[in-house]
Amino acid sequence: MRLLNHQRKLLLSIKKFYNSSFLLEDSVILGSNTGFFCNYSSRRRPDVSDIPELNEPPLKKFYEAYYQTDTGRVYDKKPFKIKCTKGKTYYWCSCGWSHDQPLCDGKCTLPEMKIKMKPVAFKPGENREYWFCNCKHTKNRPFCDGSHLSEVVQSAPSVILRR
C-alpha cells in the first residue's frame, strides 16, 4: 500500500510521540486516502531489546530441546516469575510433568514415564526476575510469550485448577 506524503509524516510524528515502544508491528495505516492509524492488537508487546537472553538464548545452539516441536501438558494457565542468578544454569520443564514447576525435577528421565520431551537449559546473563511459561505452548522457550491466552490453552485441562 502506498502512503501519501502527509500520511507518512503523520505516522512518523505518531511514532515520535509514543517513542515507538507503544506501536506494534501489526499496526497499519488504513486506506490510502484516510490517513488513520489503526492498532490491531489490544495488548502491548514488551520491549525486550535490553534483555539479550529473551531475544536469542545463548544456549540455544547447544541444546536440541529448544527445537522440540511437541508441547507438554498444560501445568498452569499463567506464567511463573523466578529470580534467577547470573551464571547458574536453570532447566525449564517442557513436558509439564515436573512437581517443581516451572523447573525440571527429572521425571522425563524415568523410562516408565515414556516422556520424549527434554528440559530446556537457560543460563541468565545477569541477576533479575524472569517469567517462565507454565502452559508449555510458548514459542520462545522457556519464557512466557502470552500463549496461555490462546483458545487452545484456555480450553485445555491444566494440572492447577482455578475456581
Image (cartoon, rainbow, N blue to C red):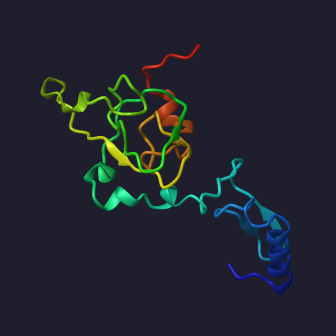
Q: Residue at x 37, y 45 (%)?
A: 89
Residue located 33% across and 52% down the image = 66
Counting from the top left corner in percent of width and height, residue 31 is at 77, 71
Taking the spot 35% from the left edge, 58% from the top edge, the residue there is: 60
Q: Position of residue 57 (x, y in %)?
A: 42, 57
Q: Quadrant of residue 108?
A: top left
Between 19 and 86, the residue placed more toward the observer is 86
Residue 134 percent location from the top left of the image: 46, 33
- Numbered-mark total: 0
- Residue extending farthest to the bottom is 5
Name the image quarter holding the N terminus.
bottom right
The residue drawn where x is 57% and y is 37% is: 149
In this view, the residue in front, 83 or 50, is 83
Q: Nearer the viewer, residue 10 or 49?
A: 49
Quarter of the image with the C terminus in it = top right
Using residue 160 as the reference point, say whether residue 37 is left or right of it: right
119 left or right of 48 in image: left
Residue located farthest toward the top when viewing the structure as drawn? 163
Residue 158 relative to residue 108: left or right: right
Residue lying farthest left? 111
Going by the image, does 48 lie left or right of 143?
right
